[in-house]
Amino acid sequence: MTEQVENFLNQFKLEFKEKYPTHLLHLYVDYIELIALFTNQDHITLDEVLNRFSDSGLIKKSADDASRAQSNDDNEAFVKSLFSEIEKRKILFSNAYPFDYNFRTGLNLKSELSNRQKLYVFLLLSSSLSIFSPFQEVLTSEFETVCYNSLSNYLPSNTIIKQFGENCEYKGNIIEKINALAKEINIEADTAFLSKISQKGNKERGLDIIGWIPFTDGIPNLLTILGQCTCQKDWQKKVGESRRYNRYLKFYLQLPLHAMFIPYSLTDYQAGEFYQSDEFGENTIVFERNRILSCSGEAEFIKSLNSIHLIESCIVFEEDII
């Protein structure tokens, strides 16, 4: 992977390939953080972001003299709102935030990053797969590993947690995997619903991580969490996929909880809710960037990821954006 990373960065130019509705401020803030990441420790100011966004077509400047002033004011107000979000992130993520921010000097990458700050960079890269498409496979696979570690730290120490997605711990096709999982939980699989699945498939059918807290009596009336992990920008399409397992498995007296793991920063701590909270629906536990980091301890495991070379190379890489 080392050679792949070097070849990628040798030709790298940070280009914003997607434009989002302006109310999705958190996605534009990610763009600003990427600029700060790839300008290394140089400060990124409001004017520089305005120029970069204009050059990338993320904002438009009016060619009409009569409306140009209003257009410039609107663009400046929009970017100011993004820097207000950066101020919130600085407070929210605290020591896990890999950037320094001052409203006078702007945003810049810190000189030395801790493991938790490197994990933040990993989540930032995983939120930008269109930019880092050559590494999509490793980022999405290892995002599941990151989520596994977060869920392990969140739940009690006696919890049994299994990976069921790309890093599945069970062998065979999907039906064989579900049957093996049912046996381990000590419940039955529903053969009628399993018969509707192609036996040739190995896809996880919407389940990436499962955790359950056992009792010593062996009775399978348990607290169970079914987790779906995705780095896709349209993660909304994935919400609810793990609910298939409410039918594949005959949970005893208690249906499972469902969790959604995404690398995006959705915590609005001032409002006490998530951005895009209307997209999750009910009965969903959300693990987004802040919660994943909060449940990752000192993030020592980051050093064992295959993507660590990509992470550390991006930290030291400097792109000339002028």
Image (tube, helix red, strand yellow):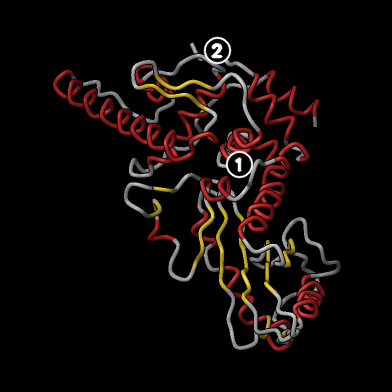
Of mark 2 and mark 1, the one earlier in the sequence is 1
Q: Nearer the viewer, residue 115 or 193?
A: 115
Is 196 placed above or below 128 here? below
**Where is residue 170 drawn, in percent x and y?**
82, 66
What is the CA distance from the residue labelled 2 to the residue labelled 1?
A: 23 Å
Q: Nearer the viewer, residue 126 or 274?
A: 274
Looking at the rendered structure, the kind of residue marked 1 is Ser
**Where is residue 219 drawn, in percent x and y?**
72, 86
Q: Which mark is residue 275?
A: none
Could you tell whether 39 is left or right of 180 in the image?
left
Which of the 4 image quadrants contains residue 318? top right
Q: Secondary structure at mark 1?
A: helix
- Screen quadrant of the N terminus: top right
Could you tell whether 51 is left or right of 157 in the image?
left
Q: Residues within 10 Å of mark 2 (few under 14, many from 20)?
A: few
Q: Residue at x 62, y 63 (%)?
A: 227
Is 272 placed above or below 9 here? below
Q: Residue at x 33, y 28 (%)?
A: 79
Q: Secondary structure at mark 2?
A: loop
**Where is residue 26 drawn, in percent x and y?**
42, 41
Could you tell whether 147 is left or right of 106 in the image?
right
Looking at the rendered structure, the kind of residue marked 2 is Asp
**Where is residue 244 drawn, in percent x and y?**
61, 75
Q: Which mark is residue 320?
A: 2
Could you tell whether 169 is left or right of 237 in the image?
right
Which of the 4 image quadrants contains residue 282? bottom left
Q: Which residue is mark 1?
A: 126
Q: Nearer the viewer, residue 308 or 237?
A: 308
